[in-house]
Amino acid sequence: MVPALAAATTHWHREGRRAMAEGAAQLLAMLGSDKALRALDALSAEHPHDALGAAVGAALEAEAQARGEAVDDLLDGCAPRFGLALDGAAELTDGRRRFRVTLVGWKPSLTDEVGRELHAPPKTTRPDARREAVIEAWRELSHELDPTRRRERRRAEDALVNQRAWEAATWTDRVASHPILSRVYEGLVWVTDAGESFTWSAADGARGPDGEAVALASVKTLRLAHPAVDAALLARWEGASLEPPFAQRERAVEPVEGVTSRFEGRVMRAHDDRHDRHAQPWDREGWRVGPIEDHRFNALTWRAGRGPVEAALAVGGMVRWSADAREATVGALTFHRASSGEAIDPRDAPPVFVSEAAASVARMLR
């Protein structure tokens, strides 16, 4: 039912049937299952700037409030575990045969009782509900592991940009003890409320920059380190052999001072390629175009996930697809509250978000 509702939501949105699309999203929220909530999160990511995205976001907020937790904590809690232990292993059995599942990197592997590698659990000649359950468990892991990895990686990077703070108990239960989320966050540097830094892995636990064990018993909150606010701390990790899911220590940092006028007068160039929807620099960076009037637009907006702040970049009459008008002069970069549109002085906005927005503009203007 959930896949059908999610597909219908997208279809009706594309057909301009807004009420039906939003109604389908509300039905997903009413189901309240982990799978339904993940579908809502996917819809929110696919429609970050339009009415459907707003409706989905409101549905997630309502569900989170009903459960007494934040939306991000809710979504952490509904990330699938696929029956895996923390080390990424599981045993599947139908009562007669046993199959062992392991994760090799992000690739699932299946072996039988004697260690032979299998593509899938073999089917039986007669109906066998327990064997079918084993086959279905393997099918779900095989099909959903990579989409789950990509979704949680996106959420992790949004958490870095928005400087999300986890309560230590929630982080321990829903990230550190989770067979998928703990892998997603491997190689990233965390900062505690006491100013200590560490990386986490299921195999080694919390380790400091010199490889020493870090005690987390007294930690109250923690977040991901960002060079815009944690440069000195991250410098201690220079030379450390880490493999994070995305750039962290090497992220470009833009100062807050002068950011509003920093790019004024620069030229933005579009690409005349209608067949590549990712060709335009703003599409690659996740900026929203619009509104469009007379085939031209004068602004781009950007927000990281469900973050509280939005950035807006003035663009002087850019034509989205045209061989004749592929350049426009950039104006001011401003910041606003996502909920109300109220303008914010860059000095009062989160410095990491300001840095990330400005770095994104710099990449678009290369």
Image: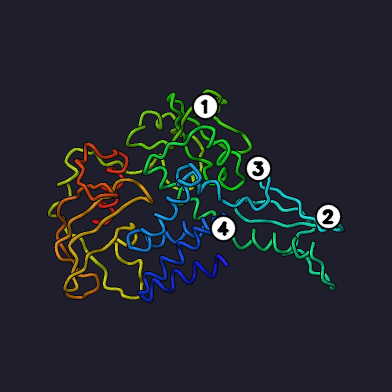
Determine which residue is flagged by label 1.
210
| 334 lies left or right of 101 | left
Comes first in the chain, label 4 or label 1? 4
Q: Quadrant of residue 300?
A: bottom left
Comes first in the chain, label 4 or label 3? 4
Q: Which mark is residue 86?
A: 3
Q: Position of residue 205 (x, y in %)?
A: 59, 33
Q: Nearer the viewer, mark 4 or mark 1?
A: 4
Determine which residue is flagged by label 2.
113
Amino acid type for the residue under numbered disc 1 = Asp
Whole-number angstrom distance, CA of label 1 to CA of label 2? 41 Å
Amino acid type for the residue under numbered disc 3 = Leu
Q: Quadrant of residue 269?
A: bottom left
- Cβ–Cβ under 8 Å for marks 2 and 4: no
Disc 3 secondary structure class: loop
Whole-number angstrom distance, CA of label 4 to CA of label 1? 40 Å
Comes first in the chain, label 2 or label 3? 3
Q: Nearer the viewer, mark 2 or mark 4?
A: 4
Amino acid type for the residue under numbered disc 4 = Lys
Q: Position of residue 201 (x, y in %)?
A: 58, 38
Q: Which mark is residue 35?
A: 4
Which residue is rendered at x = 50% and y = 31% of the image? 198
Q: Residues within 10 Å of mark 4 (few under 14, many from 20)?
A: some
Comes first in the chain, label 2 or label 4? 4
